[in-house]
Amino acid sequence: MPNYRRAFVPVGCWFFNVNLLERRRTLLVDHIDTLRDAVAATRSKYPFEIDAIVILPDHIHAVLTLPPGDADFPTRWRLIKTRFAKAIPKRERLSAVRKARNERGIWQRRFWEHLIRDEADYAHHVEYCYINPVKHGLVRRVQDWPHASFHRDVERGIFPADWAGEVEPAGAFGEREDL
């Protein structure tokens, strides 16, 4: 089994990118309440702070902080993914390997994490979360995307409602189109 190098830092803050297996599906926004329930159930047993989060149709970006003495973010993501997968109908295509392992074909097996180094790194990753729906062409203004903690941060006075203004995305973002 591969030995993935992960930074396990007690009271650490991380940026995460968690993806659906089929990147063109819209399961996360189609079943947003189910995802919220999976996150809430996981937080009740394994607490963490959601510094920033954005749910897009096929992936999640999040900045999370774990409590003192706890660096077990892999368990948290495993539970969120498992709870979500168990709660939605089985309609996905399954590979022979996933069938043999009795797995669902919803999530990519891995996720990407980045240990936040300092305040500037933190600010960059929070802003990255919030601009992501604009970057992917889902909306033209950050405030128009409903599935983000941006709205909570506006209420708290951390961001103005019109942060980033109206943006016309330039360039290709996200997954490549099939050639």
Image (cartoon, rainbow, N blue to C red):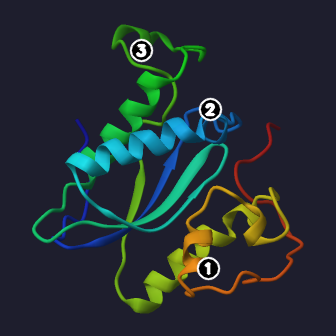
For this rendering, which residue is in front, 81 or 171? Answer: 81
Q: Earlier in the sequence, mark 1 or mark 2?
A: 2
Please report whichever mark, 2 or 3, sits nearer to the chain's N-terminal start.
2
Mark 2 or 3: in front is: 2
The type of residue carrying mark 2 is Glu
- Give the image location of residue 132, x and y in percent: 67, 65
- Give the answer, above or below, for where 141 lies relative to 1: below
Q: Nearer the viewer, mark 1 or mark 2?
A: 1
As shown in the figure, which amino acid type bears the numbered disc 1?
Answer: Val
Crowding near the residue tagged with mark 1, few <14, some 14–19, many ≥20 C-alpha atoms within 10 Å: some
Q: Residue at horizontal 47%, vertical 62%?
A: 62
Q: The N terminus is located in which quarter?
A: top left
Q: CA distance from mark 1 to mark 2?
A: 32 Å
- Outermost residue on the front side: it is 155
The mark lying in front, picked from 1 and 3, is 1
Q: Is residue 110 visible?
A: no
Q: Is residue 144 visible?
A: yes
Kindly identify the amino acid type of the residue bearing the numbered disc 3: Val
Tag 3: Cα neighbours inside 10 Å, few (<14), some, or many (≥20)? few
Indicate the position of residue 89 as horizontal and vertical percent values.
Answer: 55, 16
Query: Can you give x and y, in whole percent of width and height, for residue 64 in the image?
Result: 37, 66
Secondary element type, mark 1: helix
Quadrant occupied by the C terminus = top right
User: Residue tagged by mark 1?
Assistant: 154
Residue highlighted by disc 2: 22
Q: Secondary structure at mark 3?
A: helix
Q: With 5 as the anchor, is 158 left or right in this view?
A: right
| Alpha carbon distance from label 1 to label 3 | 45 Å
Residue occupying image coordinates x 46% and y 24%: 87
Residue at mark 3: 97
